[in-house]
Image (tube, rainbow, N blue to C red):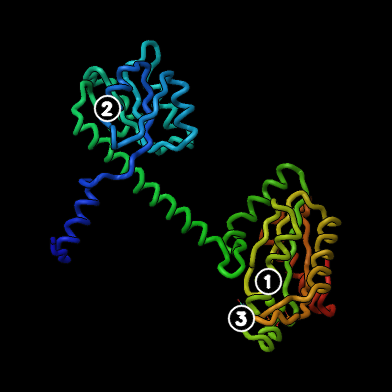
Amino acid sequence: LRAHTTRDIAIEELLRRHGTKPEARAEVLLIDERASVFERYSGILRGVANLHHVRDPQEGVLAAAEGGFECVIVSADFATFDPLRVIAQLRSLDRTRFLPIILSSDTENDTLIARALELGVNDFVVRPVDANEFVARLRTQVRRKAYHDGLRSNVAESIELAVTDGLTGLHNRRYLDTHLQSLVDRARKRGRPLSLLITDIDHFKAVNDTHGHDGGDEVLREFGRRLRGQVRGLDLVCRFGGEEFVIVMPDTSAVMAAEIAERLRLDVAETPFAVGADRSKIAVTASLGVATLDPSSAEDGAALIKKADLALYEAKNGGRNKVIA
Ligand code: GH3
Ligand code: MG
Ligand code: MG
Ligand code: MG
């Protein structure tokens, strides 16, 4: 019996990471007109990759764009088709922009290889290929892709987090700040109306005082859900801060926006919010201020927010549970 020391385990981990143990098979696409090349490469990559074969270069690009591949091997030797075009197409499509490409050439054509590398080929092999070298080059590309895919999704996740409100899952103020002006610009350019509303929960401090901060959080989440559920997908709903929310509504006139605001007000006021383990019901009301972009003035996104905020202030002063448009 072999004693398993910590050192053994560490070495095994290293070997595993460096691919001495079999890795999962990669899904690889070969674009080459010849069945003989496919047979040869299938033999070499047996146990390493599931090799898929498309003979026609244009169909090959389409197959690659359909996804599911971790690497594509492109022939440099089509009878009548320029292999550089295949590479350029693969690099220009969103779906294949980052897909590793290995160029497989019958001859050591330096000019072609150099131009292919410039177009974004990741590696190349010259036939007849050495089996071990081919496997190693392919695995390197597959690992590189996995690593970069991981990085890309981490970046996408960080960006998503940076513009999302953690409590409600709605967009946050940072997102509004970066998008409101372009929504205003677009509305002006297209000669379309644009409305914005700000809503603030009435006496929210009392909710916290009576039901605790967690109870208050639950009300905020439910409030956010109701707002999101009552407007169209293209309307931008965000948590502006504390218990204030902003909704930006493209293609929405002042009359329509006032109706929507009234509907929201009623929905909140008429259906109590359930909080806590015992789902006790809380009566909540909110005040709303509505503003519509004036096409004859030069007001910007910030001015629109200010206008809606003044209306909200009036609604609060007018006794709360009110819409001022
Ligand atoms: P008004 O009708 O004038 O709006 O009264 P209000 O009590 O709602 O207004 P105020 O702005 O005085 O109080 C807002 C409260 O919201 C104070 C703050 O502690 C609370 N609050 C802000 N953010 C959160 C949060 O994320 N969770 C909870 N539970 N409370 C929050
Ligand atoms: Mg306040
Ligand atoms: Mg309030
Ligand atoms: Mg407030």
Q: Position of residue 249 (x, y in %)?
A: 73, 55
Question: Which residue is depicted at the point 81% across and 58% down?
Answer: 257
Establish whether ligand 4 lies closer than 8 Å to the Cβ of label 1. yes
Nearer the camera: disc 3 or disc 2? 2
Q: Secondary structure at mark 2?
A: helix
Q: In terms of depth relative to the viewer, which is nearer, 168 or 171? A: 168
Q: Earlier in the sequence, mark 2 or mark 1?
A: 2
Indicate whether 52 appears above or below 201: above
Q: Earlier in the sequence, mark 1 or mark 3?
A: 3
Q: In terms of depth relative to the viewer, which is nearer, 203 or 35? A: 35
In the rendered structure, find residue 214 and report the number of the disc placed on it.
3
Where is residue 242, by image quadrant?
bottom right
Question: Which residue is depicted at the point 71% across and 57% down?
Answer: 248
Which quarter of the image is occupied by the N terminus?
bottom left
Ligand 3 placement by image quarter: bottom right
Q: Amino acid at mark 1?
A: Glu
Q: Position of residue 160 (x, y in %)?
A: 52, 57
Q: Amino acid at mark 2?
A: Gly
Compute the Cα span from label 2 to label 1: 64 Å
In the rendered structure, find residue 244 and report the number of the disc placed on it.
1
In the rendered structure, find residue 43 and report the number of the disc placed on it.
2
Mark 2 residue crowding within 10 angstroms, few (<14) / some (14–19) / many (20+): few
Q: Amino acid at mark 3?
A: Asp
Residue 314 can be seen in this image: no
Nearer the camera: disc 1 or disc 3? 3
Where is residue 105, by image quadrant?
top left
Q: Secondary structure at mark 1?
A: strand
Horizontal side of residue 81 vs 234, given as left or right? left
Nearer the camera: disc 2 or disc 1? 2
Q: Secondary structure at mark 3?
A: helix
Question: Which residue is depicted at the point 72% across and 46% down?
Answer: 188
